[in-house]
Image (cartoon, rainbow, N blue to C red):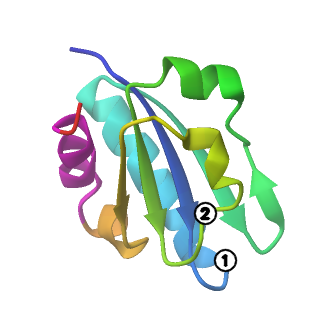
Amino acid sequence: MRKKILAVTACATGVAHTFMAAQALKKAAKQMGHIMKVETQGATGIENKITDREVAVADVIIFAVDTKVREPERFKGKKCIEVPVAAPIKNAQKIIEEAISQI
């Protein structure tokens, strides 16, 4: 069944791994037939910011981070999993499956 998944990616320096993880998650979600939006929190700030409306309709949220999520209060009350930023780069499909299993 198609799921609405949100993700936040952020590495300690906010450069390469942040965006590599975002790309890996988006690609895997598309291949698996899910809807995904990824917010990146990098050196340049928050890009592709997740809205309150998107949070409200999301089935689950993935935090692929090696640092603190900025504005975490936006996701209060939602099913969330947190993994290291490298995890989706290695196997994004596994991370998505793990997230969906939390629903």
Mark 1 lies on residue: 15
Is label 1 in contact with label 2 (beta carbons under 8 Å)? no
Q: Is residue 83 magenta?
A: no
Residue found at the very far bottom of the displayed protein: 13
Q: Please provide percent x and percent y for residue 93.
A: 23, 48
Q: How many marks?
A: 2
CA gap between label 1 and label 2 equals: 15 Å
Rendering quarter of residue 9 = bottom right
Say which label, 1 or 2, has the lower sequence index: 1
Rendering quarter of residue 45 = bottom right
The quadrant the C terminus occupies is top left
Q: Please provide percent x and percent y for residue 38.
A: 56, 44
Q: Please provide percent x and percent y for residue 15.
A: 66, 77
Q: At 61% across and 24% down in the image, what residue appears?
A: 54
* Circle 1: residue type: Val
Q: In the image, which disc is placed on residue 36?
A: none
Q: Nearer the viewer, mark 1 or mark 2?
A: 2
The quadrant the N terminus occupies is top left
Mark 2 neighbour class, 10 Å CA radius: few under 14, some 14 to 19, many 20 or more? some
Residue found at the very far right of the displayed protein: 44
Q: Is residue 96 magenta?
A: yes
Q: Image check: 49 left or right of 86?
A: right
Q: Main secondary structure of the magenta part?
A: helix
Q: At 29% across and 23% down in the image, what residue appears?
A: 33
Bounds of the magenta span? 91-101
Q: Image check: 88 left or right of 22?
A: left
Q: Nearer the viewer, residue 4 or 15?
A: 4
Say which element carries label 2. Answer: loop
Mark 2 lies on residue: 69
Q: Nearer the viewer, residue 63 or 21?
A: 63
